[in-house]
Image (cartoon, rainbow, N blue to C red):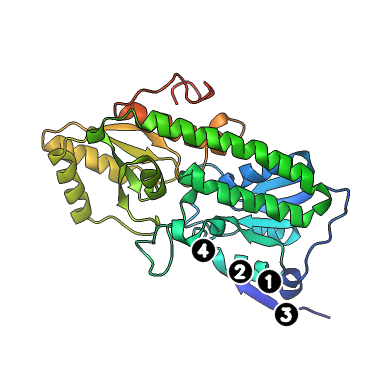
Amino acid sequence: MISTRRHFLGLSLSAAALAATPLRAAAAPVGVVATTGMIADAALRIGGDLAEVKALMGPGVDPHSYRQTRSDIVALTRADLVLWHGLYLEAQMEELLLKLAARGNTEAVGEAVPVGQRIAHKDYSGKFDPHVWMAPGLWTHAVRAVEAALARTAPEHADTFAANAAAYLAEIDRLDAFARDTLATVPDGARVLVTAHDAFGYFGRAYGFEVVGIRGISTESEAGLDRIRKLVDMLVARRIGAVFVESSVSDRNIRALVEGASAQGHEVRIGGELFSDAMGQPGTYEGTYPGMIDHNVTTIAAALGGRVPTRGMAGKLSAGS
């Protein structure tokens, strides 16, 4: 019998492949596919040797505009467990992910953050800012959701997953305390974070920073000339000395701010590159969730006049990070 075909953004997938839940051998590691690096890091830390984890989106990849490839679809349909963020982060993949959710082996872990602790989306009515990982205290909800999903998939290993999750959450708690203490050393008048897009709202709320993104919460929004002019005037009027580029967003608009302020006689420097929607390179400390946040905190505090320890929270940041 020939199955019917369904099409997603020009890619075809059989109805049978969508409907069937993979059967996992009890002795085999849990096959996990995660959309983002931040989710994959949690799955790796909690799953340990009991999970094989694949991240669809690597360093420098923008999840707002990412579209699934044929190989992604194959990996997603064969996975024992699919972990995605939700909150409209994977906007171009959402239709496919919702179809896969009907199989019961998916979890939108970002949506574990309580509604009352979310920030309303500035670009889309009725939706929320998805960048909850920027506040470690909020990200713990997603980490617990990853643990619960792994335990449902392989209940025989639930105790191991719980112990691994407890150790990972303790590290995130230390990270949150480090961020709070370090960022508190930034002078009050300098606590303005200007970035390429509005990804740091939860960060600003958690640590007392005014956050200004040139583009909106979604990188799909564009910054017009009027927006650039207004931000240049703000930099000059408030004597803001540093702005920040992001690893997964073009630096074109940030450089336009620097040049515009210079034309008005005010020097603004690029304070460093921040990790917003993606982590650093695999195999590096910055390529882990704790390293990503440690890098951001250390870079922001150093550029805005705070006191930072050499190479971050535990001396693990790459030289020059």
Residue corresponding to mark 1: 102
| Label 2 – label 1 distance at C-alpha | 7 Å
Quadrant position of the C terminus in the picture: top left
The type of residue carrying mark 4 is: Gln
* Image location (x, y in percent) of residue 29: 81, 47
Task: Find numbered disc 4 in the image and state the secondary structure of the residue it sits on.
Answer: loop
Place residue 163 in its image quadrant.
top right
Which residue sits at x=46%, y=51%?
A: 131
Which mark lies nearer to you, 3 or 1?
1
Kind of residue at badge 3: Thr
Q: Which residue is mark 4?
A: 92
For the residue pair 31 and 260, the one nearer the viewer reads as: 31
Q: Which residue is mark 2?
A: 98
Which label belongs to residue 4? 3
Q: Which of 68 and 269 lies nearest the eye of the viewer?
A: 269
- Nearer the observer: mark 4 or 2; the answer is 2
Q: Residue at x 44, y 40 (%)?
A: 247
Q: Is residue 60 visible?
A: no
Mark 4 vs mark 1: which is more N-terminal? Answer: 4
Give the image location of residue 307, x and y in percent: 35, 23
The residue positioned farthest toward the left in the image shown? 264
**Of 129 and 162, which appears nearest the observer?**
162
Please tell me whether mark 2 or mark 3 is closer to you in this view: 2
Are the residues flagged by discs 4 and 2 in contact, CB closer than 8 Å? no
